[in-house]
Image: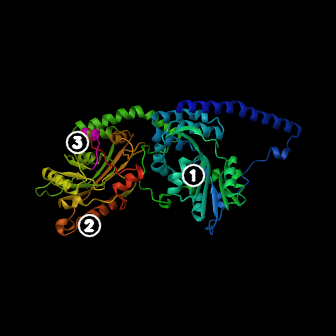
Amino acid sequence: MLFTMVFLKLVEWLVYQLLANSCYRAAMKVKNYGFFLRNPPLRSQQHQASPNIYPSVTKCRVQNRGSDTLVCDIDGTLLRPHSFFPYFMLVAFEGGNLLRAFLLLLSYPFLCFLNYKLKLRVMIFITFCGLRLKDMDSVGRAVLPKFYLENLNLQVYEIWAATGCRVVCTSIPRVMVEGFLKEYMSVDDVLGTELHTSGKRFTGLLTSSGLLVNHKAVKELFGEKRADIGIASSSLHHHHFISLCKEAYVVTKEDLKNRAAIMPKNKYPKPLIFHDGRLAFFPTPLATLVMFMWLPPGIILAIFRLLVGIYLPYKLAIFFGCISGVTIHAKGCNRSGQKTGKGVLYVCTHRTLLDPVFLSTSLGKSLTAVTYSLSKVSEIIAPIKTVRLTRDRKIDGDTMERLLSEGDLVVCPEGTTCREPYLLRFSSLFAELTEEIVPVAIDTKVGMFYGTTASGLKCLDPIFFLMNPRPAYYIHVLGKVPREMTCAGGKTSHEVANNIQTQLADALGFECTSLTRRDKYLMLAGNEGVVKDNKR
């Protein structure tokens, strides 16, 4: 039923585009041609350039704007890149699948020959046809904000932050931008193109209102009143709606090239701590093409790296890993605690599921790792012993004490991974178990894929990390925590945990937070991040 409806709507739209719309444009061209035959333009008009009739956004005054209303577009205005193709690619890849993303990439050469409106319709259809509403909601909440923040135009944002009321008017689908604008930008109203849905899926078509026409939407919203400031890109089809504002400015191509338009992280409207998705790069057409070309050899390389880590001795694993492109920067790995009948407890920051594996390889000795949630596949392929915790403090404490009596143990007290330079709140349970505590600062660098996910398949996390052309691990084993700074020296478990968190944050140049695993998963995946055990 859904396919039939979509097909009929698509045929109807194609007929309109190919016949009615084309004939209208042809008639207008003939009419204009006849007009120019009768009224040839003046010589001065023929050679006159068509500069922007509105001043650059850099000319806009920022002071005393607290009571003003700002209306602007997001494409090429609030965001620096002119093309919105990478954001559609993010939705197609993260919300859809590889096939959908590949089809969108294949369409790019044809998109270059289409006008703005037709190009937008084609990208919307390929990206959204059959896409589930909840997948778009997840991408809009957990994936897109990172890339939006990285590409914010600082010059426009400074005006945005100075005004009292902000309205975004765009022909981009509203579902792609509204979540970010409300969560991070404190927007008052979002006017965007509405998409047609059937049940719990998008059809890829627009509602009866079609693509949003900026100037009509602004006129309907404000009526006889006029917004104080209007900002648009240098494209002429965006100039109409800012003519309805008291002051109008444009973001020129020169403004976009200016480094002053780049938004530094310390000026983000809100800190970006959590985000999801697999792509670690901005998927421009060229970058996406490179990714698809890399996928076949990347999968083979990831399997090779995985087998090397599982079956080869530590020194050979490091050797072949480095040959294959994996970089390990290890510091202080010759340090170890003085054993007192128990094993050493290595307290690590958590970046990927492979943290204990790389630590074990760098130290050159076998370790046992404990984790709160681990997929069965990851548990099977792990080259070191892994034990799943239950979230019952008494049971988990007894389990970790038993493991420490058998040998060295690795624990990540954050309880989950974090991609950005922040440390989540440390659980204090580990501090109650032993005084032989060695903090380990761990960080990773990737260029193509993230090796973590909150809403995807966790069993693929190691594969995605190892698929990167040159993944890097930074491991810094700090000195053993002095006895007087442990529970045996009179400190509470919370004081010990907070002290170690601060010590590791300083070593990495990170910032401490009080956020927890639960906060992360509720924000990114809408759950508490527990992997269900089918046996229970």
Q: Say whether disc 2 or disc 1 marks the residue closer to the N-terminus.
A: 1
- Provide the secondary structure element on which disc 3 rests: helix
| Magenta-span inclusion, residue 376 | yes
Instruction: Answer yes or no: is residue 251 visible.
Output: no
- Provide the secondary structure element on which disc 2 rests: helix
Label 2 crowding class (10 Å Cα cut-off): few <14, some 14-19, many 20+? some
- Distance between the alpha carbons at the discs numbered 3 and 2: 36 Å
Return the residue found at the far left.
341
Label 1 crowding class (10 Å Cα cut-off): few <14, some 14-19, many 20+? many
Q: Which residue is mark 3?
A: 314
Q: Mark 3 touching mark 2, by CB under 8 A?
A: no
Amino acid at circle 1: Leu
Where residue 49 appears, x then y in whole percent?
A: 76, 47
Quadrant in which the C terminus is drawn? top left
Label 3 crowding class (10 Å Cα cut-off): few <14, some 14-19, many 20+? some
Q: Quadrant of residue 500?
A: bottom left
Amino acid at circle 3: Tyr
Where residue 486 appears, x then y in whole percent?
A: 20, 65
Q: Which residue is mark 1?
A: 79
Residue 472, placed above or below residue 495: above
What number is the disc on residue 495?
2
- Distance between the alpha carbons at the discs numbered 2 and 1: 43 Å
The magenta stretch spans which residues? 372-380
Q: Quadrant of residue 534?
A: top left
Where residue 418 appears, x then y in whole percent?
A: 37, 53
Q: Quadrant of residue 467?
A: top left
Left/right of residue 293 with respect to residue 440 in the rendered view? right
Q: Mark 1 touching mark 3, by CB under 8 A?
A: no
